[in-house]
Image (cartoon, grey):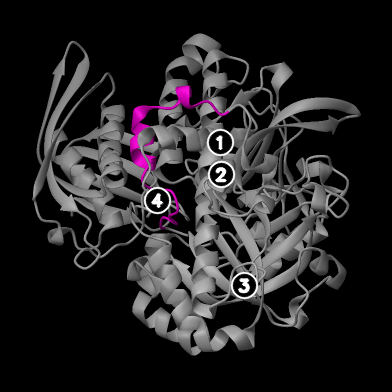
Amino acid sequence: MPYHYLEEIGTADIAFEATGRDLPELFSDASDATMNVMIDNLDAIEPRETRHIELSNNEIDMLLFDFLQELIYFKDAERLLLRVRAVQIEQRNEKYFLKAEAAGEPLDEARHQQRADVKAVTLHDFSVEKKNSGWKARVLLDI
Amino acid sequence: MTMVDNLQKISNTIWELPATYKEGMRVPARIIATEKLVREMDEAVYQQISNVATLPGITRYALCMPDGHSGYGFPIGGVAAMDVHEGGVISPGGIGFDINCGMRLMTTNLTLDDVKPRLKEIVDLLFQCVPAGVGSHGFLKLSRSDFRDLVEQGARWCIEHDFGWNEDLELIEENGCIAGADAAKISERAVERGYNQVGTLGGGNHYLEVQVARPEDVRDKELAAKFGITIPNQIVVMFHCGSRGFGHQVATDYLQTFLKVMEPKYGIKILDRELACAPLDSPEGRDYFAAMKCGLNMSFANRQVILHRIREVFSQVFGRSAEELEMRMVYDVSHNTAKLERHVVDGKDKKLLVHRKGATRAFGPGHEEVAARYREIGQPVIIGGSMETGSYLLVGTASGAETFFSTAHGSGRTMSRTKARKQWHGKQLQRDLEARGIYVRSTSWAGLAEEAGPAYKDIDEVIAATEQAEISKPVARFTPIGNVKG
């Protein structure tokens, strides 16, 4: 399972753990975990519009923080639900650079089963860690 | 040893974690609750409230209200008063991402008998006219520049644009327009997230409810009458929402700003990055305060437009004007906020920045900041319960100084959303509630399940705790009959 929700962490909020063999997979899984808090049937999100995301940060965890915020931004500004298609992450001069392509469509109440609106990514116990088998992130979303 | 054994019982409703509990605590942490509620609190509350006690400028105690539960940075129910002259900080984690999330209550002259036959029609129309759900956009079409005016002017902007009555403004803190809100301190991104969301509920635990004040639930008839509750089985409308994506972005923006300057520039070390902060008396602190005030105003405006829509809906259903239906606002409370207030501490008058995150201000009778109409009796306090149980109207007390005149804000969750959705199913819950006389409309079946009554503490126990602690006094309890859930 690329991500799972944590029952015992957070009460009003929703916590998840995501894993990936590498950083692009981790970022992609964490973005689906975030979108899945808002929409139950992710498969119903059709790739009708594309958005390109470019970010950089000195810290890998803050890069993920910024990346997840992008999805939340599009959800409010354009009511656009996005799924990440391709992620590239490079490290140069002790800084991380991300390029991603995300595709999706505006929320359609008839087709998209809503769950909870995500207000923000919190930094409470927020972590991105390298494990033997890949990468793991822990995220608490404010609902 | 369980965590609760670390607490010193100061009285039946005050439980203290001494300043020696954790390195860096500047003051003790105090939980205001009955023993039953303290024992039910998750351990994260103790960790989070003791972290708050380490923040610069914190005065007397880091406090947690009876409905407290695990949050991020501060626990939900957290109260901390920072002495501005002692390097006191401002922290987005002490206010919440949803700046000025709060409650509004309005009365009507209708009774349960009037509303019951039209209940579905009313709730269906409310569901249509007050958009809810993930990223919901409102019917109010504003330009970005109009929105910047709105966040500086708050509910006053709405009245000037015919969304409400003049008297509504008298029933909101600072007449619905917080002075010092500066749109130059907000990002374009915050504007983009918010300018099309005015008049929307959002999701999660936000709701709009049609409720009834049963005669046996009116605890103090005299006070209730002063708040406009005078008829047996009178219908009232209560709703809960905040500053939507705009406020969330303002908080996110400044959380990042503070993380960058906190330690290198101000030498502040924190135990949880969600407690990122800066001295209020610093360029970053002042900027956030001015931006956060825009969030306060956005939320007042959001609730004002919703109030107006509710009046339109009732007016349409009953074929009478909102004035004829006496749809008067009782009050608007904010439970995610930070305000500069004067408090007496150890006999000295101090200017404190009081953070309330999931806590409601509750000034007692005679306080100059209470709306003129209620000044003699004290500030109204609106506490929302789960959609299954009930909600309360209370009043602030003169004896609330111990909590900087703060009380609970809701019934407080006891179960995670993830766990709750495994135990209940939204469609079944809706049918069960309907059989019990509560008609619910929601944008989300899963979201509905997550809001099931048993996922919350016992609201009556929470209210009793605030009464025993003498931080607020119940006036009336309301029973839900119709609910629009985000």
x and y percent of residue B408 in the render? 67, 54
Q: Residue at x 57, y 47 (%)?
A: B159
Q: Choose the circle earlier in sequence order: 1 or 4.
A: 4
Determine crowd level at label 2: few under 14, some 14-19, many 20+ residues with C-alpha closer than 10 A: few
x and y percent of residue B432 in the render? 45, 85
Residues drawn in magenta: B181-203
Which label is found at residue B140? Answer: 4
Taking depth in this image into account, of B76 and B224 the one nearest to the observer is B224
Q: Are marks 2 and 1 in contact (CB under 8 Å)?
A: yes
Badge 3 is on which residue?
B390
Callout 3: chain: B
Q: CA distance from mark 3 to mark 1?
A: 33 Å
Residues at discs 2 and 1 both on one chain: yes
Q: Are marks 3 and 4 in contact (CB under 8 Å)?
A: no
Q: Residue at x 30, y 55 (%)?
A: A37
Which label is found at residue B153? Answer: 1
Label 3 amino acid?
Gly
Q: Residue at x 53, y 78 (%)?
A: B319
Residues at discs 3 and 4 both on one chain: yes
